[in-house]
Image: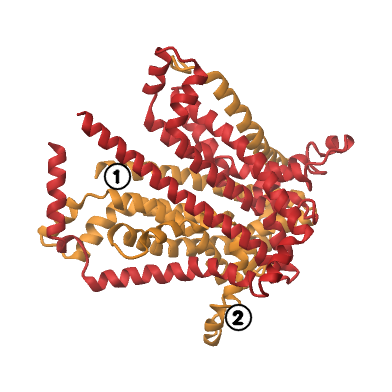
């Protein structure tokens, strides 16, 4: 009954659009203003990266990317993401499982605490690790006696990156798994599956697209983080420079074309992220539509 | 009192244990260290540090530029969300995807790119210079960078609310004789307002802490174009750990208050949303 009313409703709207939309010139004006704003604030900055990167020619572009320091920065960025993303992935799944499949006291406090790294300025995210592990920090002298370096070394960069990308996967999964409830898992358990089987065969297939989306966002931020990593890195060329930090160094040395060449790789990563995000969104809407169609057929 | 309700699902202990340990090690203990570190300062030392003229100038710039940027984002973010939800035009899906660019593009890349556009000889700057308008290396430059990074927050909070809005309300208003503008300002805007305010607050909070996209375009002149996060780094580089920590605590407290406000706003927004 409700369905037929909704259908008739849309038919009425499309037959008489005037009352609930604007005149053609207002529409054009609004679309035009939105486009102008987007061109100046999003499109031009994106295009400028590639224009500047190629301003000294294609050969210079590839030479800049083949410098030993550039390759070292790319390697360090990949290594950092390869450690930070899986750790936050495991955390995100564990936290979402505990939060969405069980009822316990203090749940909303826990959800708020998971979001904390998003509220903290990147600079402060780096600072807290300097205060803990730096030479003047709480654990600094102790680390020094064992000749362990965390700050101005790779472990500090990894730690700061884990901190800033901490909430991404959990945040994507919690609302999704909340919506899905626990009925399917309960059914699996009643039918004799053990915990891991239930997770891998029932829960994981249900959340895979949301999980993938969280990982994509987490990875983009891990590879692109600048402020937090800048505080803990010490900027040692070839050793503790990630790609964004190397972009800054080249830029401050007035090697603009080389700086934009490295930046263009990061911009490409951003574009790939956007395409992947759109694809995942499209896939989820499609799955949702299929489910609805299937539900209708079974009725 | 029961701390946890019984459930036949397994794994609560392991998942919860790992969550709490990891959360404590990565987030809670390091943040606590920051507050403990400030406790080593006397109240007077703390107060002198956080109210020094150069520090106050940085608050004024950070707050002013963030507020202006969030306002611009509220207006244009709403417009973009409106256009994306209500109208069809070629390239709509690309525009929709592109709105997330500031989330995906590393801040340092945005910073150098905006700077190259807005300097006097740059792609946009060369047209503004004859008019005597300078963007790069002025507080306006800071604002431009903050507009860039804050835009998706407003669009992505307003867009779903606009999508769910019941068209019957507008039809009712129109059939009762309201003009299109009256329908917009008295029916649509009040319904979307909580979401718009949430988006504004999110953009503002993000702008306050932003560092990477701002340092290149701001020029970093003390008292004039030095934002608070940069001041923290400057203090660190001078080995003034106590000073850096004190300013960081002020920023952190402001961020937490904002986070609380945003949580309340979101609750209000969803309650409002369900009610309409």
**Residues at marks 2 and 1 on the same chain:** yes
Q: Nearer the viewer, residue A196 or A170?
A: A196
Element at label 2: loop
Q: Splitting the image into 4 quarters, where does residue A254 fall?
A: bottom right
Q: Which residue corresponds to the image point at 60% horizontal and 47% vertical from the top-left?
A: B252
Q: Is residue A221 above or below residue A37?
A: above
Q: Which residue is mark 1?
A: B273
On the picture, is A121 further left or further right than B241? left
On the picture, is A272 further left or further right than B82? right
On the picture, is A108 further left or further right than A286? right
At label 2, counting other C-alpha atoms closer than 10 Å, the crowd grade (few under 14, some 14-19, many 20 or more) is many
Q: Quadrant of the N terminus of chain B?
A: top left
Q: Colour of chain B?
A: orange
Q: How far apart are the two marked residues, 2 and 1, measured between alpha carbons?
A: 46 Å
Q: Which residue is mark 2?
A: B120
Q: Is residue B118 above or below residue A279?
A: below
Chain for mark 2? B
Q: Chain letter for red?
A: A
Q: Nearer the viewer, residue A67 or A175?
A: A67
At label 1, counting other C-alpha atoms closer than 10 Å, the crowd grade (few under 14, some 14-19, many 20 or more) is some
Q: Is residue B68 above or below residue B248?
A: below
Q: Is residue A134 above or below residue B186?
A: above
Q: Quadrant of the C terminus of chain B?
A: top left
Instruction: Give the percent coordinates (x, y) of residue A30.
Output: 32, 69
Q: Splitting the image into 4 quarters, where does residue B77 fall?
A: bottom left
Instruction: Give the percent coordinates (x, y) of residue A155.
Output: 75, 41
């Amino acid at each position: 009954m409700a369905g037929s009313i909704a259908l008739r409703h849309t038919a009425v709207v499309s037959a008489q659009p005037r009352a609930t939309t604007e005149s053609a010139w207002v529409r054009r004006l609004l679309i035009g203003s939105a486009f102008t704003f987007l061109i100046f604030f999003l499109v031009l900055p994106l295009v400028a990266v590639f224009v500047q990167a190629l301003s000294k020619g294609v050969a210079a572009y590839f030479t800049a990317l083949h410098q030993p320091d550039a390759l070292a920065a790319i390697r360090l960025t990949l290594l950092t993401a390869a450690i930070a993303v899986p750790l936050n992935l495991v955390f995100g799944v564990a936290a979402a499982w505990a939060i969405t499949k069980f009822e316990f006291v203090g749940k909303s406090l826990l959800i708020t605490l998971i979001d904390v790294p998003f509220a903290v300025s990147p600079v402060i995210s780096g600072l807290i690790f300097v205060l803990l592990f730096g030479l003047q920090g709480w654990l600094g002298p102790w680390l020094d006696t064992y000749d362990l370096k965390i700050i101005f070394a790779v472990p500090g960069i990894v730690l700061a990156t884990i901190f800033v990308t901490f909430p991404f996967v959990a945040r994507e999964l919690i609302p999704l798994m909340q919506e899905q409830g626990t009925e399917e898992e309960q059914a699996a358990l009643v039918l004799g599956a053990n915990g891991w089987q239930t997770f891998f065969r029932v829960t994981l297939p249900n959340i895979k697209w949301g999980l993938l989306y969280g990982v994509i966002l987490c990875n983009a931020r891990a590879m692109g983080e600048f402020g937090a990593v800048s505080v803990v890195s010490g900027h040692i060329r070839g050793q503790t420079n990630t790609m964004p930090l190397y972009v800054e160094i080249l830029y401050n040395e007035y090697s603009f074309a080389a700086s934009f060449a490295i930046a263009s790789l990061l911009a490409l990563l951003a574009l790939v992220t956007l395409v992947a995000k759109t694809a995942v969104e499209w896939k989820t809407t499609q799955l949702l539509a299929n489910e609805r169609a299937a539900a209708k057929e079974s009725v | 009192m029961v701390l946890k309700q019984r459930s036949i699902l397994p794994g609560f202990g392991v998942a919860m244990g790992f969550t709490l340990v990891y959360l404590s090690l990565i987030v809670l203990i390091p943040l606590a260290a920051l507050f403990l570190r400030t406790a080593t300062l006397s109240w007077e030392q703390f107060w002198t540090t956080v109210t020094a003229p150069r520090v106050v100038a940085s608050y004024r710039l950070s707050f002013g530029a963030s507020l202006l940027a969030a306002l611009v984002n509220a207006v244009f973010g709403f417009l973009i969300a409106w256009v994306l939800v209500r109208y069809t035009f070629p390239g709509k899906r690309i525009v929709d995807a592109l709105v997330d660019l500031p989330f995906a593009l590393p801040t340092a890349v945005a910073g150098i790119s905006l700077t190259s556009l807005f300097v006097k000889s740059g792609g946009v700057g060369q047209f503004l210079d004859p008019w005597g308008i300078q963007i790069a290396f002025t507080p306006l430059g800071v604002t431009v960078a903050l507009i860039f990074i804050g835009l998706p927050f407003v669009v992505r909070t307003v867009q779903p609310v606009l999508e769910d809005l019941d068209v019957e309300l507008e039809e009712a208003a129109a059939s009762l004789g309201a003009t299109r503008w009256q329908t917009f300002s008295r029916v649509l805007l009040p319904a979307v307002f909580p979401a718009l305010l949430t988006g504004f607050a999110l953009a503002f909070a993000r702008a306050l802490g932003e560092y990477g996209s701002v340092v290149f375009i701001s020029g970093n002149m003390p008292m004039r174009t030095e934002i608070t996060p940069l001041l923290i780094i400057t203090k660190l580089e001078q080995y003034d750990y106590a000073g850096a920590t004190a300013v960081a605590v002020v920023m952190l407290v402001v961020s937490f208050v904002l986070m609380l406000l945003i949580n309340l706003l979101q609750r209000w927004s969803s309650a409002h949303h369900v009610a309409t």
